[in-house]
Image: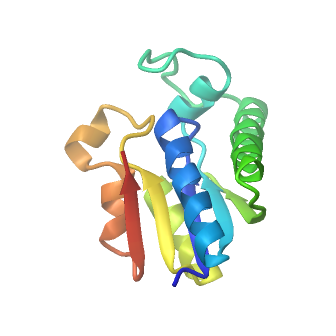
């Protein structure tokens, strides 16, 4: 049913729960897993030790800090997949709009399913503009699963 599953990661507990569910589905359907992370100030700060919910960043951190946080989040995702006996086919990490990057990855790899956490580390502005998981559903041409 699902040959290729794209999972959006931001380092939050919710995105890790989404990955665990995606791993379960990948096992059931022998699917490929593709992990996507789009660095944002909140995810960089959180990955490098900030307390969730505490806004510590007002500008984008240095490129080195962004790369360090991205590597940490992607490696954590790979480790979770390994716990479930799954391998990750590809990882994608590109700066930009998270929803657009996740959909672009899904388009490029020919995904059948996108899995994201319903509430990640997004900003308060997401409450007005809509969360990443909500913005993925509009342009997506495949199934989208938003995990609580």
Q: Residue furthest left?
A: 128
Q: How many marks?
A: 0
Q: Is residue 89 left or right of residue 146?
A: right
Give percent across and percent down for residue 51.
Answer: 52, 15
Q: Position of residue 128 (x, y in %)?
A: 20, 42
Q: Is residue 122 left or right of residue 24?
A: left
41 relative to 128, above or below: above
Q: Position of residue 81 (x, y in %)?
A: 71, 52
* Residue lying at the far front of the rendered structure: 28
Q: In the depicted view, which residue is nearer to us: 25 or 99?
A: 25
- What colouring does the structure picture have? rainbow
Q: Quadrant of residue 94?
A: bottom right
Residue found 50% across the figure and 51% down from its top:
18
- Picture coordinates of residue 35, whole percent (x, y): 65, 59
* Quadrant placement of the C terminus: top left
Closer to us: 89 or 56: 89
Q: Residue at 51% x, 34% y: name it.
A: 13
Which one is nearer the viewer's eye here, 44 or 75?
75
Q: Is residue 10 left or right of residue 123?
A: right
* Relative vertical location of residue 56 with respect to residue 61 in this rendering, above or below: above
Tell me the residue at 54%/80% (across/down). 2
């Amino acid at each position: 049913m699902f040959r290729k599953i794209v999972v959006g990661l931001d380092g939050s507990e919710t995105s890790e729960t989404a990955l665990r569910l995606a791993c379960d589905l990948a096992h059931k359907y022998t699917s490929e897993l593709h992990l996507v992370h789009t660095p944002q100030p909140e995810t960089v700060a959180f990955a490098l030790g900030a307390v969730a919910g505490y806004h510590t960043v007002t500008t984008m951190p240095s490129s080195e800090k962004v790369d360090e946080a991205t590597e940490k989040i992607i490696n954590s995702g790979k480790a979770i997949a390994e716990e479930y006996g799954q391998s990750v086919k590809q990882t994608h990490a590109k700066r930009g709009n998270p929803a657009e990057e996740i959909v672009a990855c899904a388009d490029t790899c020919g995904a059948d399913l996108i899995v994201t956490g319903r509430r990640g580390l997004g900003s308060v502005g997401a409450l007005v503009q809509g969360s990443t998981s909500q913005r993925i559903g509009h342009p997506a041409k495949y199934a989208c699963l938003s995990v609580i």
